[in-house]
Amino acid sequence: QIKAFLFDLDGVIVDTAIYHYQAWKRLATELGFDISEEFNEGLKGVSRMDSLDLILAHGGLTLPDEEKAKLADQKNEWYLELVSRMTPEAILPGVAMFFSQVRQAGLKTALGSVSKNAPLILERIGMTDAFDTIIDGTKISKGKPDPEVFTKGADELGVRPDECVVFEDAVAGVEAGKRGGMFVVGLGSPDVLRQADLVAPSLAELTVDEVLSKSK
Ligand code: B16
Ligand code: MG
């Protein structure tokens, strides 16, 4: 029986993925190359340093660790400029409705984000209290596709992996949920999120009842 829903943040609750992309693209441009939207798909759900490594490899660059730390800080500064302007209006369509159904169904909720900025974003959009527990980038040692962010969420809620449904928009996040032994709802395109157990364009096209009946 399903007892908890675990939600990714970027691309599920809010579209901060676009801000990450803009900030990384700006960094790549300064380094003398470009990153495409398609390349960006592979960065979704991936930690800050792992993303930087992928980008540098893409541009054919090898840099010392101190230099990489500076670049990651620079990207985060640009990213935070964009995040600081966020308001509750940034919450994606269907999220509020879905969460009221979640509460009505008596399900527990966790946030499972590898972003170190997740608490700040939740604060900006007024959704801190929507989660029984918040697992963010400061609480984990391995980013997605490692399942740690979700297994930790399940542990904190006191539920087993097979009692959880994960909601994810990223390839790495879907893989993390599957490796954690959970039912995974992919939000986006079925061509991209091939490993997901169920795919919908966004939370706006789903009801809690539908998810519960399909994850049985
Ligand atoms: P930060 P999620 C992930 O968040 C993003 O999808 C990914 O693009 C980002 O690099 C990562 O967080 C780290 O974020 O630099 O803010 O610590 O999808 O797991 O909510
Ligand atoms: Mg995401």
Image: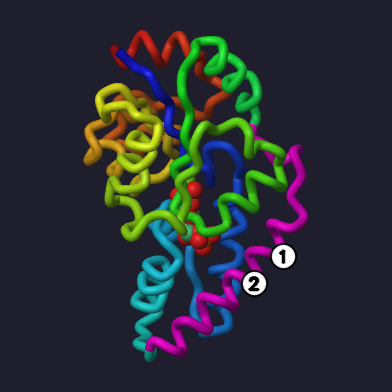
Residue 30 visible in rendering: yes
Helix, strand or loop at label 2? It is helix
Task: Give, as a three-letter code, the residue at label 1.
Answer: Glu
Give the answer, above or below, for where 70 lies relative to 183.
below
Task: Name which residue lies at 52% across and 29% down.
Answer: 202
- The image's mark for residue 81 is 1
**Residue 156 drawn in magenta:** no
Could you say which quadrant of the image residue 76 lies in?
bottom right
Question: Which amino acid is tagged 2?
Answer: Glu
Q: Where is residue 56 in the image (x, y as percent from the top left)?
A: 40, 78
Q: How far apart are marks 1 and 2 (CA)?
A: 6 Å
| Neighbours of disc 1 within 10 Å: few (<14), some (14-19), many (20+) | few
Q: What kind of element bears circle 1? A: helix
The C terminus: image quadrant = top left
The residue that label 2 is drawn on is 77
Q: Is residue 148 shown left or right of residue 59? A: left
Location of residue 59 with respect to 129 vertically, above or below:
below
Indicate whether residue 74 is drawn in magenta.
yes
Residue 8 higher or lower than 67, as above or below: above
In this rendered view, identify the residue nearer to me: 158 or 69: 158
**Dominant SS type (magenta):** helix
Q: Which residue is drawn at 70% across and 60% down?
A: 82
Magenta residue span: 65-92
Q: At which x and y percent is residue 50?
A: 37, 67
Is disc 1 in contact with disc 2, using a CB cutoff of under 8 Å?
A: yes
Relative horizontal placement of residue 114, taking residue 20 as reference (left or right) = left
Q: Which residue is drawn at 64% across and 53% down?
A: 120
Which x, y percent locates residue 91?
A: 67, 36
Splitting the image into 4 quarters, where does residue 150 fall? top left
Task: Using the image, determine if residue 51 lies above or below residue 155.
Answer: below
The foreground one among 136 and 200 is 136
In the image shown, does 89 or 161 lie closer to the viewer?
161
